[in-house]
Image (cartoon, grey):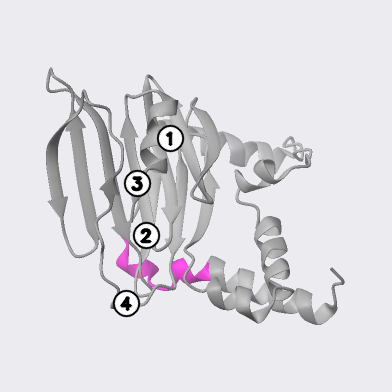
Amino acid sequence: MKLSDEKLQYAAKLAAKAELEPWLDYEAYEEPVFSEKFQQRMQALIENVRAGSVAQDRARLGWQYYSRRGLAAVLLCFLLSCIAMPEAVMASGRKVIEVVRTVFEEYTEYHFTSREKAEAQLTPLTFGYLPDSLHKNTEEITTITYFVDYVDSTGRIIFSLEQDLLTENMTSTYIADTEDANVKYGTIKGREVQLIEKKERIQFVWIYEAYCITGQTRLPEEEILRILQNIEL
């Protein structure tokens, strides 16, 4: 794709708007409370920066490397690609949820924005497959959220899922514990799913149509993928 100054300026404006939008109502948020461990690490980092002892990270090639670090360069490349898309493709993509994924040392933060119309209605998903050993324990439905969990014969929760409808009048943030976790990426129904395995549990984050579908399970990886693949919306 041939780039011009006009395209670069347009893409940069879109990237800047996406970065600044979550902070428009910053006064409504409570002051964050950081752990002593986090503050110690940040103080050490600040001192290293002042001393000039922080080396620049060597860039590697590859989409996953950049996506896991939430670099603006990736967002810029994505926006530049969108500029070259046919209008029909852009029109069909207006309802896709945009995800900004930021990876910190102890967790990963997902920030979601949606172009789905505010009057959209939640349609609770249904499971086309679940292991026979699981039994429904809790089920809750609101106008924008569906939650359900399943237990085994001993009453231990084995699988839980939350389906959130995201619309244009809201923003949403999800935090996943990714410290020392085994993180994998897959594809379900043409959309990326992230699996975070840690201490015999698997968290999952999956964006499909106007829904953010998250949860955790003690089931093996192949089972959770089978469950997600057979979900009907």
Reading the image, the residue beneath label 4 is 118
Which of marks 3 and 1 precedes in the sequence?
1
Q: CA distance from mark 3 to mark 4?
A: 24 Å
- Image coordinates of residue 188 in percent, x first then y, are 49, 45
Q: Which residues are magenta?
A: 20-30
Residue 30 seen: no
Reading the image, the residue beneath label 3 is 231
Tell me the kind of residue under disc 2. Ser
Residue depth check, mark 2 versus mark 3: number of the one nearer the observer: 3
- Residue 172: mark in rendering: 2
- Image coordinates of residue 9 in percent, x first then y, are 75, 78
Residue depth check, mark 1 versus mark 4: number of the one nearer the observer: 1
Q: CA distance from mark 1 to mark 3?
A: 10 Å
Viewer-nearest residue: 2 or 151: 151
Tell me the kind of residue under disc 1. Leu
Q: CA distance from mark 4 to mark 2?
A: 14 Å
Please indicate whether residue 68 sits to the left or right of residue 149 in the image: right
Determine whether the residue tagged by mark 1 lies in a helix, strand or loop: helix
Q: Residues within 10 Å of mark 1 (few under 14, many from 20)?
A: some
Which of marks 3 and 2 precedes in the sequence?
2
Which of marks 4 and 3 precedes in the sequence?
4
Magenta includes 181? Answer: no
Tell me the kind of residue under disc 3. Ile
Above or below, comparing residue 120 to residue 215 in the picture: below
Q: CA distance from mark 1 to mark 4?
A: 30 Å
Reading the image, the residue beneath label 1 is 225
Residue 150 seen: yes
Magenta includes 26? Answer: yes
